Image (spheres, rainbow, N blue to C red):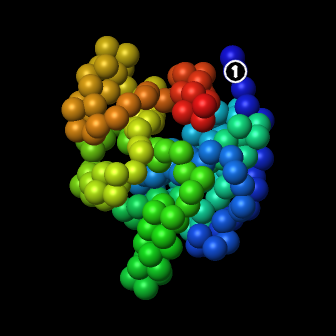
Amino acid sequence: MKQLNANFIVSAEKLSQCPDFSLPEFPLLGRSNVGKSSFINAICNNKRLAKTSNTPGKTRLINFFNFSDLFTVADLPGYGYAKVSKEAQARWQKYLEEYLLNRSQIKSLIQFIDARHEIQKNDFQMREWVENYNLPIFTIVTKIDYIPRSKQLGVISKIKKSFSGDVLPFSATDRRYCENVIEYLINLCK
């Protein structure tokens, strides 16, 4: 199985603090606890690289990871749930919009959807915002291993009907589809 080495680079609150790299960058968008950090750990086969938590809203900064000097991944704070003040949420939104709209290294956004649940209202709102600005995006369906194999294609096709662009299944638990996702990311970098 293809495997990438990865290392944590830096955390940033806003665009001006982001690392000055020329590598293609993939920001990870998704609700809290959708599996963004587990995704990072799975594609580099290192369970300790990105911090995972059962408590939603733990990621509060943009966390950058370098994957074998091929591309970087930016783990963003999850949307939809965070026990923080309205002022803090407004500040995050402002900083994240600034980052997503002005970061020249971004190759494509990746939106994460949990296979176990219907697409949520805030998932649709995020997608609408992204499409409003014509930003490149594709979808990763996480936790696909929780769905019986006989129903997985149905879940994926339902998401494809709702969201434009490619939709890729993913399981961090058994690392199924890891190789497909790695190849997809590498091809986007070309």
* Rendered location of residue 9, percent (x, y): 76, 56
Q: Is residue 70 visible?
A: yes
Residue at point 27%, 44% (across, down): 119
| Residue 12 found in image quarter | bottom right
- Which residue is farthest bottom? 87
Q: Counting other residues with Cα less than 10 Å from the Cα at mark 1, is it few (<14), some (14-19), or many (20 or more)?
A: few
Q: Give the camera-side residue of 94 and 118.
A: 94
Residue at point 34%, 35% (across, down): 165
Q: Give the camera-side residue of 182 and 190.
A: 190
In the rendered image, the quadrant that contains the N terminus is top right
On the picture, is 101 further left or further right than 53?
A: left
Task: Report the residue marked by disc 1.
Answer: 2
Element under disc 1: loop
* Rendered location of residue 148, percent (x, y): 36, 20
On the picture, is 54 further left or further right than 50?
A: left
Measured along the vertical axis of the image, is residue 75 above or below residue 118? below
Q: Amino acid at mark 1?
A: Lys
In the rendered image, the quadrant that contains the C terminus is top right
Measured along the vertical axis of the image, is residue 29 above or below residue 80? above
Number of marks in picture: 1
Residue at point 40%, 51% (across, down): 135
* Rendered location of residue 7, percent (x, y): 77, 47
